[in-house]
Amino acid sequence: EVQLVESGGGLVQPGGSLRLSCAASEFTFSDYWMTWVRQAPGKGLEWVVNIKQDGSEKYYVDSVKGRFTISRDNAKNSLYLQMNSLRAEDTAVYYCARGRSGSCWGQGTLVTVSS
Amino acid sequence: DVVMTQSPLSLPVTLGQPASISCRSSQSLVYSDGNTYLNWFQQRPGQSPRRLIYKVSNRDSGVPDRFSGSGSGTDFTLKISRVEAEDVGVYYCMQATHWPYIFGQGTKLEIK
């Protein structure tokens, strides 16, 4: 069964940084675009960023451009999200998802930005 | 950016009765390759989202056949032929034709 397991969330002060990880298993990770989607508490879903199979293309939503960086390590079947200059409005559960249409999702990791 | 508008936002349904959710986009979702990248997701209470339907009408593996998707261009519909208790949750449409990809606001389905 396809598995995506996120980690790295936590409480961070405004202006701080955090690095999320997503460990993938039971599918050929290097064959797929990968994605981060977030959901603020009690709110809807927001597609944050995509990365191509070889990492050569990345697409960010405007609200995180210049602050967040997506990367992947196909040898380790892992996806990452480096988040810098965090703001209160970045508080959300962050989900890792497979593909550009979200065919499978992880359980999410909560990021809380607060002083 | 494309605007995705779902209706209704709240959907009380009697068990065994049908349900329908509409999703409208502010521009055509037909991509240059001829495909329409409109997907539907279900999020049960306390769970991660799960994709039900991709490219308008293709059911994902394991999704009961009481779920169906239809539509074209800017107008799409998710139908549940007979609602069951396990269908309670929030349903989102999402377009993956134009960047940034956008979700609808969500439709909360509850049992009457």
Image: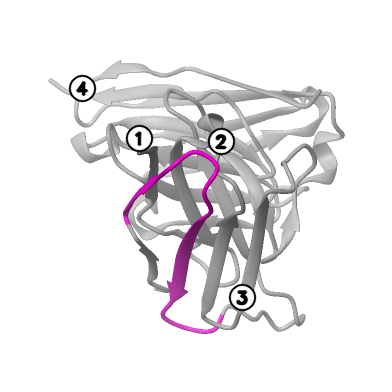
Q: Which mark is residue A13?
A: 4
Percent from the top left, x then y, of residue A23?
68, 22
Helix, strand or loop at disc 3? strand
User: Dot 4 falls on which chain?
Assistant: A
Q: In whole angstroms, how far apart are the C-alphas of marks 2 and 3?
A: 24 Å
Question: Between B61 and B48, which is closer to the camera in this rendering?
Answer: B61
Q: What residue sits 27% from the left and 34% below the top?
A: A42
- The front one of B48 and B69 is B69
- Please say if A90 is above or below B2: above
In the picture, the disc for residue B84 is 2
Q: CA distance from mark 3 to mark 1?
A: 40 Å
Q: Is residue B14 left or right of residue B74?
A: left
Is tag 2's residue or tag 3's residue first in the polypeptide sequence?
Answer: 3
Task: List the residue tagged with mark 3.
Answer: B71
Residue B73 placed where, x, y %? Answer: 58, 83
Mark toward the viewer: 3 or 1: 3
Q: Element under label 1?
A: loop
